[in-house]
Image (cartoon, rainbow, N blue to C red):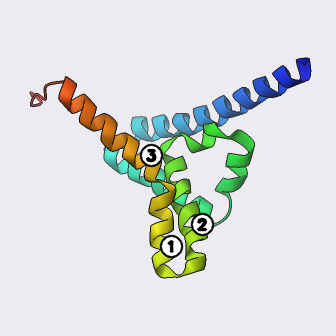
Amino acid sequence: MFEEYAEILIGFIKAFAVGGLICAIAQVVINFTDLTAGKILVIFMLAGVVLQGLGVYQYLVDFAGAGATVPICGFGYLLANGGIRGAENGLFGALTGALSSASAGISAAVIFAFLAALVFKAKSKKN
């Protein structure tokens, strides 16, 4: 019984360490560059796509689980992974495979953004 709890704890530690390292890298980029948040998000997502395309990111996912899939680079990994699997069915399969693998996350983002828009009142940003 203790071994099961120890295994769960080690999984949490791995996820926290890898996710924290990814966030720490992002924070360093924010602090030492003039890149906007949108550009940083795109860079990290594309990094996930490229690393999965090279076959590297899967090792990180196998090691850290949610620590590697929850950050935005995990979304890039998800798109690339779906595209690679869908490419077995041709070019159209590569496009639809990427979208179908990420459909739950995209749908959740759209639904929760809509609900937030219903609850909160938008205001213009004051300079």
Decide: marks 1, 2 in contact (CB < 8 A)? no
Location of mark 2 (residue): 53
Please state which amino acid type lies under the numbered disc 1: Ala
Q: In the rendering, which numbered label is found on residue 105?
A: 3
Q: Is residue 27 left or right of residue 14?
A: left
Location of mark 1 (residue): 94
**Label 3: element kind:** helix
Q: Residues within 10 Å of mark 3 (few under 14, many from 20)?
A: few
Q: Is residue 90 or residue 54 the one in the foreground?
A: 90
Viewport quadrant of the C terminus: top left
Viewport quadrant of the N terminus: top right
Q: Position of residue 81 (x, y in %)?
A: 58, 61
Q: Residues within 10 Å of mark 2 (few under 14, many from 20)?
A: some
Q: Residue at x 59, y 69 (%)?
A: 84
Q: Residue at x 56, y 76 (%)?
A: 87
Q: Is residue 122 left or right of residue 99?
A: left
Dot placed on the residue nearer the N-terminal end, 1 or 2 = 2
Q: Residue at x 64, y 29 (%)?
A: 16
Q: Is residue 123 left or right of residue 87?
A: left
Dot placed on the residue nearer the N-terminal end, 1 or 3 = 1
Q: Position of residue 31 (x, y in %)?
A: 41, 34
Please state which amino acid type lies under the numbered disc 3: Gly
Q: CA distance from mark 1 to mark 3?
A: 18 Å
- Which dot, 1 or 2, sits closer to the camera? 1
